[in-house]
Image (cartoon, rainbow, N blue to C red):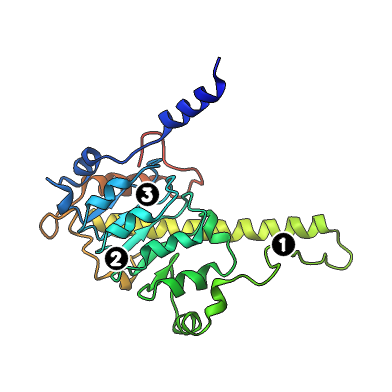
Amino acid sequence: GHPGRARTLSAVCTMVRLTEKLVLEKTKCTSLYGVRNINLWGSSLDDVDVVQRMPNLESLSLSVNRVASLRVFARCPNLVDLHLRKNDIADLDEVRFLVGLDRLRTLWLCDNPCALEPNYRMRVIAMLPSLLVLDGDEVTLDERRAAETMPDVFLPSPGAARSSPEPSPGSTRADDDARSERTVNADRAVRDANARSYELAASRQLAGLGPIGGHHVPSQRADMPLGNAGGGGGGARSEAAMSLAAEMDSSRHSPKGPSPGGR
């Protein structure tokens, strides 16, 4: 008799929250204070508020989840590496929550709705002066200078979001739209493959496994304590990272996500 209420209850029931218990199980830590690295790739998480209680967190992978805000990461002052590829972050102004993270060097935000906003890359670079790598591409000196000297990068050109190119001579707008869509899809497929290779390399390094297919974690990540899986001694292996690396290794040629129950 109350379909609206039923839909609301269903939405609440399907939300997936990251809990302290799950974090401690994955990292083998005794407290959240000791967690330094955790990989939660493809866990269908909506609520990750618990990361606010991890002040020593340095490396966090939340790619392929349902995170919609960056607010909670403002309470993680030691973050160096943050993977948020393929989530639900719609507003690019959410990046302002990361402004105080002076140690942040690597950020992945591609394949979020906010990455479609005008001047996406330049705006992120302007907001995060300590960033070295954005979406797998090194922040160049020219990009950094442009971000520092062009305050208008925060504003899209008037009408830019609404304007459409004229069709090519001898073709219809539908033809041009189809070609444009194919180009965008091809670029997205290449970027997705590169991102998965990057995440796989990082996961294998965290698990103490060797590289595959010639993929190595880039040198700018060398300052990350990947061998310290959640605060243990040097060389300690993360069970969660090992299973994730094996899963991504076996499925890296498949366009589909992780199998049910996988991370």
Query: Is 36 left or right of 114, judged from the image as shown?
Result: left
Q: Any mark on residue 80, and which?
A: 2
Classed neighbour count for the residue bearing mark 3: other residues with Cα under 10 Å, few (<14), some (14–19), many (≥20):
some
Marks 2 and 3: in contact by CB < 8 Å?
A: no
Q: Is residue 212 visible?
A: no
Q: Is residue 81 above or below residue 35?
A: below
- Compare residues 43 and 16 and report the one nearer the observer: 16
- Compare residues 87 and 174 and report the one nearer the observer: 87
Amino acid type indicated by mark 1: Arg
The residue most toward the right is 170
Mark 3 against mark 1, which lies toward the viewer?
A: 1
Classed neighbour count for the residue bearing mark 2: other residues with Cα under 10 Å, few (<14), some (14–19), many (≥20):
many
Q: Is residue 30 above or below residue 36?
A: above
Q: Any mark on residue 249, and which?
A: 3
Query: Is 104 left or right of 230, judged from the image as shown?
Result: right
List x then y, in percent, for residue 257. 46, 43
Q: Which residue is mark 1?
A: 162
Figure quadrant of residue 214: bottom left
Q: Residue at x 66, y 61 (%)?
A: 183
Q: Residue at x 63, y 59 (%)?
A: 184
Alpha carbon separation for disc pair 2 and 1: 37 Å
List x then y, in percent, for residue 150. 53, 82
Figure quadrant of residue 4: top right
Q: Residue at x 34, y 38 (%)?
A: 17
Q: Secondary structure at mark 3?
A: helix
Q: Is residue 251 visible?
A: yes
Which of the image's four quarters has the N terminus? top right
Marks 1 and 3: in contact by CB < 8 Å?
A: no
List x then y, in percent, for residue 202. 31, 59
In primary-sequence order, the first of circles 2 and 1 is 2
Q: Any mark on residue 245, and which?
A: none
Classed neighbour count for the residue bearing mark 1: other residues with Cα under 10 Å, few (<14), some (14–19), many (≥20):
few
